Image (tube, grey):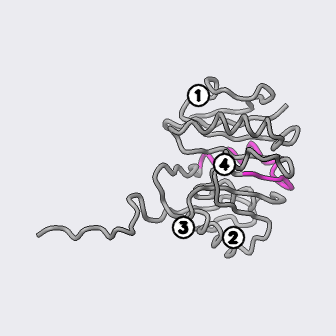
C-alpha cells in the first residue's frame, strides 16, 4: 500500500527544536523553535563556555545577533542582563517564534527584524554595539563580508566583543586587523572563536 504523500505546506526540514536558557533571569526556561535547513543551534556546553568568557561584559551591553536562527545566543544575552538586543534572520518562522518567546517572557528590550544581515549592515549604524554574535549558515561565504561591514560601517563599540562560528579555522579567516582573537575552541566540525576589537 503506498504511503500517503506529505502535504505540500510541510517544509522539508520541518519540526520543532527545543531550547533551554542556561543562566540569568530566565534560567532553565525552555522554548521551542522551528527547525530549518542549515540551522545549527549553539550547543548548551559551548553556550555556557562562551557566556563564562563574557560574564563581565554582558550586563548593560548593547547586543546584535545577525543570524539569529533559534535565538539561543540572543535570548541568553537578554537573560543575563544585556541592556538591549537586536536579532535578524531571513527566516520568517524563526522571527515569529522569537516574537512569541519575547512576549511569553514579557521582555521589552529585545528587538527583532526580518531581513538580510549584509543588506542591513550596508547602512550606517544608529548606535555602536558592545557584543555581536555571528553564526551564519555555512557554505554561503557570509562570515568574512559581515565582519568587514561591521568594522567599516561603524557598527562596533571601541572595545566590542565579537563571537564567530565557522567551518574553517579562525586563523584562516580574513578578519579586520583591529580585532584580536581572545579564545577559540572546536566542537565537531565547527570552530568557535571570541574576538575583541582593539
1 or 4: tag closer to the N-terminus = 4
Q: Are marks 3 and 4 in contact (CB under 8 Å)?
A: no
Residue 115 is a magenta residue: no
Residue 105 lies, with reference to residue 169, above or below; the image says: below
Q: Earlier in the sequence, mark 1 or mark 2?
A: 2
Q: How many marks?
A: 4
Quarter occupied by the N terminus: bottom left
In the rendered structure, are the residues bearing label 2 and label 3 in contact, judged by CB atoms less than 8 Å apart? no
Q: CA distance from mark 1 to mark 2?
A: 34 Å
Q: What crowding class fits label 1: few (fewer than 14 Cα within 10 Å), some (14-19), or many (20 or more)?
A: some
**Residue most toward the left?**
1
Q: Is residue 14 left or right of residue 2?
A: right
Tell me what residue is drawn at x 69 percent, y 44 percent: 50
Residue 75 image label: none
Q: CA distance from mark 2 to mark 4?
A: 21 Å
Q: CA distance from mark 2 to mark 3?
A: 12 Å
The foreground one among 184 and 116 is 116
Q: Which residues are magenta?
A: 45-64
Distance in Å between CA atoms under marks 1 and 3 = 31 Å
Depth-wise, is mark 2 or mark 4 nearer the camera?
Answer: 4
Crowd around label 2: few <14 · some 14–19 · many ≥20 (10 Å): some
Dot label at residue 32: 3
Name which quarter of the figure residue 198 lies in: top right
- Residue 135 is situated, as x and y percent measured from the top left of the image, at 61, 45
Which of discs 3 and 4 lies nearer the camera? The answer is 4
| Figure check: 136 above or below 8 | above
* Nearest the eye: 152 or 43: 152
The answer to whether marks 1 and 3 mark residues whose Cβ atoms lie closer than 8 Å is: no
**Which residue has dot 2 on it?**
102
Q: Residues within 10 Å of mark 4 (few under 14, many from 20)?
A: many
Mark 1 — residue?
Answer: 169
Residue at x 63% of width, y 73% of height: 100
Amino acid at each position: 500500500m503506498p504511503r500517503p504523500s506529505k502535504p505540500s505546506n510541510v517544509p522539508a526540514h520541518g519540526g520543532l527544536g527545543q531550547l533551554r536558557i542556561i543562566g540569568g533571569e530566565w534560567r532553565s526556561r525552555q522554548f521551542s523553535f522551528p527547525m530549518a535547513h542549515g540551522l545549527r543551534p549553539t550547543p548548551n556546553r559551548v553556550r555556557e563556555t562562551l557566556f563564562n568568557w563574557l560574564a563581565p561584559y554582558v550586563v548593560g551591553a548593547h547586543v546584535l545577533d545577525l543570524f539569529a536562527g533559534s535565538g539561543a545566543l540572543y535570548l541568553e544575552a537578554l537573560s543575563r542582563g544585556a541592556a538591549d538586543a537586536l536579532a535578524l534572520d531571513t527566516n520568517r518562522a524563526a522571527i515569529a517564534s522569537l516574537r512569541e518567546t519575547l512576549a511569553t517572557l514579557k521582555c521589552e528590550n529585545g528587538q527583532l527584524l526580518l531581513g538580510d544581515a549584509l543588506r542591513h549592515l550596508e547602512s550606517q549604524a544608529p548606535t555602536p554595539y558592545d557584543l555581536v554574535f555571528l553564526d551564519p549558515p555555512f557554505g554561503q561565504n557570509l562570515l568574512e563580508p559581515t565582519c568587514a561591514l561591521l568594522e567599516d560601517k561603524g557598527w562596533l563599540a571601541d572595545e566590542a566583543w565579537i563571537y564567530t562560528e565557522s567551518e574553517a579555522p579562525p586563523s584562516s579567516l580574513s578578519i579586520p586587523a583591529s580585532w584580536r582573537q581572545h579564545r577559540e575552541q572546536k566542537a565537531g566540525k565547527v570552530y568557535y572563536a571570541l574576538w575583541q576589537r582593539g
